[in-house]
Image (cartoon, coloured by chain):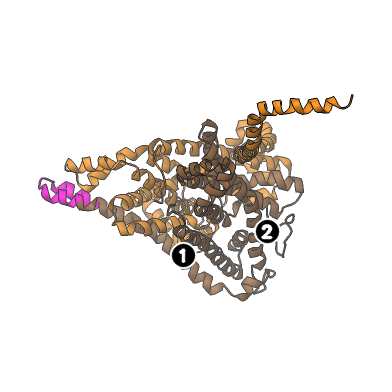
Amino acid sequence: MPERATTVQHSVPAISWRRRITDHVMTGVAVLTVLIVLVPLVAIFGYLVYRGFGSINWAFLTQTPKPVGEAGGGMANAIVGSGLILGLASILGVPLGVGAGIYLAEYGRNRFGNVIRFTADVLNGVPSIVIGIVAYSIVVLYQKHFSALAGGVALAIMMIPTITRTTEEMLLLVPQALREASYGLGVPRWRTTLSITLPTATSGVITGIMLAFARVAGETAPLLFTAFGNQYWNLRTDQPTAALPLQIFTYAISPYDEWHRQAWAGALVLIVLIVTAVSAVRVAVRRGTFGVT
Amino acid sequence: MPGPQPLEQPKVMPATLVRTSPILRASVGEIPDHIFRFAMLACGVAVLGVLVLIVYELVLRSSLSWHAFGLKFFIGQDWNPVNEQFGALPFVYGTLVSSLLALIIAVPLSVGVAVFTTEMCPRALRAPLSFFVELLAAIPSVIYGLWAIFVLVPLLTRYVQPVLSRTLGWTKLFEGPSFGYSMLAAGIILAIMIVPIISSITREVLMVVPQHQREAALALGATRWEMIRIGVLRNARAGIVGAIILGLGRALGETMAVTMVIGNRPEIARSLLAPGYTMASVLANEFSEATGNVYLSALIEIGLALFLVTIVVNALARLLVWSVTRGQPARGHA
């Protein structure tokens, strides 16, 4: 496009002075918006790396929190707790999301499919804190106490729409001829979906799962009154559990310097986790069957 | 007479088998297909079920507050859990003002970024640029909040707010002492958070504007900016509005970063430099400590209101974006 624009400009001398200035000014404005948007990105990452690396140490990764006022201690229990909650969320959310995606791609070319598609999009926009309330009322109120399971349910609900829609998109990219070849060989439809279509789209489906995972890994709001947090180790799904984002929140709004330091270290660990997940996806997809995302 | 009977039965059976076997065999072969289809359908229905469950739980558990306060709940200004007085207006006000402020800041920036990446920038710069902007979307809310507490708020307190109150104080929008923790801080952090979503969807919408619209504008002697204005932006109007509304939906429900910088004071202040409170932050701060059924029910009613508003906003946005990209492979990352 740009080359074309310039040739037109040069060959037509009638473009007025004012129009040409406007053109340059607007280009300048667009460049400026990009720079303004990149400033916070650089500022956030720069400051995060600077404060995070200054605060992270072996104790942080291996110990549980020390009482207020004592130096040292770490977030090991929160890192493991996050793993537990995210594991539960994936166990609940991934099969449901992928299943719904398969339904939409293979059987959902109808009005009911559209309803589900729209529902998934709407669900994607529900504020995470509201999902926390729902997980509270369907799990915590019955268990009578906060638990890792409640946190897992909340995060699973948040994972489902993303997984559903990407799975559908990726399955639709698989050429119809591949399915027909399979039917032609007498393979039943379910077998075709599970052994031909789904494996062909694997890299794309995994992308969707990892994106959903990265999205919920940093979620704090739905965990506030579901997983709740815990100062100690916990590996039981029916007990209050520490989570990395929760711990960062608690420490960030506390008045103690030592805790602020640890909040930055925690933030660094969290962001490394998420960026690793997202980049792993990029690499996996580039090597995958098709280069689409 | 036990002999003939077993002899007769085999005679009958082959006949019936021959008649029914194609149907019988076909339906037996299709049973796994039906099971699989049914299982996948169940997953699809579960997605619908989750949404229904959300509505059901919110309505059920907020009914106590609804019966106690009715519509007055949303126009009352007094939030006093001790006296069981619940008026949610300060939270509604805080949510609306912080989100609108965020939109005012974020919309020009996001549209500018989208226009630059689709229409102006060198091809080689396109992918890295959109990757960087989308990286902003990957940062968790709590980390935005952390950064805002330790970088943005001190910056505002020391440099920005004194200048604003000196120069624009007469508008009454920027007056009073500068705490740093304020509606303004919340608006700015929200703006940073919604730029990626607005700009990536705007980009998606701009990319489906047919190429011949651009070529036609250029052929008529338009400069590049005129081509963008007439050929691109005008055609993508509805979709851009959709993208903005989608950003609004995100801003309305955003919790952690806002809670960490808005100051959490349930008062309606005209000044943007004064602390405020939002619907999402009051849930974050008070839900797990809410004692008494009415208190909890009042909080859940705020959640229900937040839910309904975001549903309407998102549905509207989806319809607008769909109206532009329908029939097109709307895949923003391509």
Subunit of mark 1? Answer: A
Which disc number belongs to residue B28? none
Q: Is residue A112 above or below residue B140?
A: above
Q: Is residue B242 above or below residue B164?
A: above
Residue A18 is one of the magenta-drawn residues: yes
Residue B104 is one of the magenta-drawn residues: no
Residue with the mark numbered 1: A45
| Residue nearest the observer in this picture, B104 or A277 | A277
Q: Position of residue A66 (x, y in %)?
A: 68, 70
Instruction: Name the element at disc 1.
Output: helix
Q: Is residue B103 above or below residue A64?
A: above
Quarter of the image for residue A84 reads bottom right
Give the magenta range: A4-25
Residue B269 visible somewhere in the drawing? no
| Residue nearest the observer in this picture, A209 or A33 | A209
Q: Position of residue A37 (x, y in %)?
A: 38, 56
In this rendering, position of residue A216 left or right of residue B189: right
In this rendering, position of residue A43 left or right of residue A246: left
Mark 1 touching mark 2, by CB under 8 A? no
Chain seen in brown: A
Quarter of the image for residue B236 reads top left
Residue drawn at x 56%, y 55% is A213
Residue with the mark numbered 2: A229
Q: Amino acid at mark 2?
A: Gly
Chain seen in orange: B
Q: Position of residue A141 (x, y in %)?
A: 74, 45
Residue drawn at x 63%, y 56% is A86
Q: Position of residue B330 (x, y in %)?
A: 41, 43
10 Å crowding of disc 1: few (<14), some (14-19), many (20+): some
